[in-house]
Image: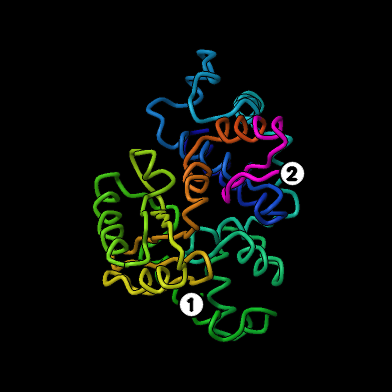
């Protein structure tokens, strides 16, 4: 398997964890997504690294995932991966490339209509939406159906969620968003997150974090970004927009007193996060993206 194929498989595992229990498997989801990023950006094929016996030397990939990659290369499949992805139709994974489609949304549609074929999944959903059948799913409605049709059109124009942007271009756009957010009087601190903060060679979605005592005002300011094409999501603590260049930008807001915890949680490696959590537990504390508290 190529690095690209292995990275895609790792992202499928992350998505399957999200479908089954996003809150419970949060750290596994982060770990698999970061491992996928690492594999995708390696200059050497994993199969060659495996032959050299150096899989455990790759930074950013934990011991467990390294052992699974070794099993994948040596046996062609991983029993643990098959167990995690069991019950998730291939069509659900295919839909994840479409803008605005998260794991649960993709799974809901694929399972409701018993879609199995990943190659035809996008066209199948488009046909269902045009027939008005998506709106009949509880929790969706006509607006969701219209948004799905628009998202599929964007997908066909090449605006996929898995498309990655070279770091210099991502930095340029991120800086524009950061500068715009700093114009809000309610934005106390503004920082990028994820692969952008880690300065990876290419970047997926652009993630921005803001420390504020007035989250709704910051979110309202963010979704008024002049370079936005449309609002993808707007909630109480997060929001997402699609820029005119087809790039997704995600915002998370946090109170100043727990902002450092959020930065660490969404930037630090899996090993780093696990070590901190274990250290906190030994001290009778609980650590999350919201900060530290006594158990």
The crowding category of the residue bearing disc 2, from other C-alpha atoms within 10 Å (few below 14, some 14 to 19, many at least 20), is few
Farthest-out residue, top: 52
Q: Quadrant of the C terminus?
A: top right
Is the residue 210 above or below the residue 42 in the image? below
Residue 252, which numbered label?
A: none
Q: Which residues are magenta?
A: 279-295
Tag 1 residue: 149
Upstream in the sequence, badge 2 or badge 1? 1
Q: Is residue 289 shown in magenta?
A: yes
> As drawn, is 147 to the left or to the right of 279?
left
Secondary element under disc 1, as helix, strand or loop, is helix
Towards the viewer: 8 or 286: 286
The residue drawn where x is 75% and y is 43% is: 83
Q: Is residue 291 shown in magenta?
A: yes
Towards the viewer: 22 or 212: 212
Question: Which colouring convention does the figure follow?
Answer: rainbow
Query: Is label 2 or label 1 in front?
Result: 2
Tag 2 residue: 295
- The reply to whether residue 40 is in sight is yes
């Amino acid at each position: 398997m190529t690095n690209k194929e292995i990275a895609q498989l790792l992202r499928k595992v992350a998505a399957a964890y999200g479908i089954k229990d996003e809150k419970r498997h949060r750290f596994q989801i982060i770990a698999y997504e970061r491992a996928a990023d690492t594999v995708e950006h390696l200059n050497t094929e994993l199969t060659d690294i495996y032959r050299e016996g150096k899989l455990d030397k790759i930074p950013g990939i934990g011991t467990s995932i390294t052992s699974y990659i070794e099993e994948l290369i040596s046996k062609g499949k991983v029993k643990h991966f098959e167990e995690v992805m069991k019950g998730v139709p291939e069509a659900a994974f295919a839909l994840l490339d479409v803008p605005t489609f998260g794991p649960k949304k993709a799974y809901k549609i694929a399972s409701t209509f018993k879609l199995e074929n990943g190659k035809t999944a996008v066209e199948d959903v488009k046909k269902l939406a045009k027939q008005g059948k998506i709106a009949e799913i509880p929790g969706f409605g006509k607006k969701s159906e219209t948004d799905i049709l628009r998202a599929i059109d964007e997908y066909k124009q090449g605006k996929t969620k898995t498309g990655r942007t070279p770091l210099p271009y991502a930095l340029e756009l991120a800086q524009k968003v950061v500068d715009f957010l700093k114009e809000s009087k309610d934005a106390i601190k503004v920082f990028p997150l994820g692969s952008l903060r880690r300065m990876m060679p290419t970047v997926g979605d652009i993630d921005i974090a803001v420390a504020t005592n007035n989250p709704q005002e910051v979110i309202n300011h963010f979704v008024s970004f002049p370079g936005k094409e449309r609002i993808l999501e707007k909630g109480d603590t997060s929001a997402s927009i699609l820029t005119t260049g087809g790039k997704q930008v995600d915002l998370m807001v946090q109170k100043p007193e727990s902002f450092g915890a959020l930065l660490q949680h969404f930037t630090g490696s899996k090993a780093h996060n696990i070590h901190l959590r274990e250290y906190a537990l030994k001290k009778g504390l609980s650590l999350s993206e919201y900060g530290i508290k006594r158990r």
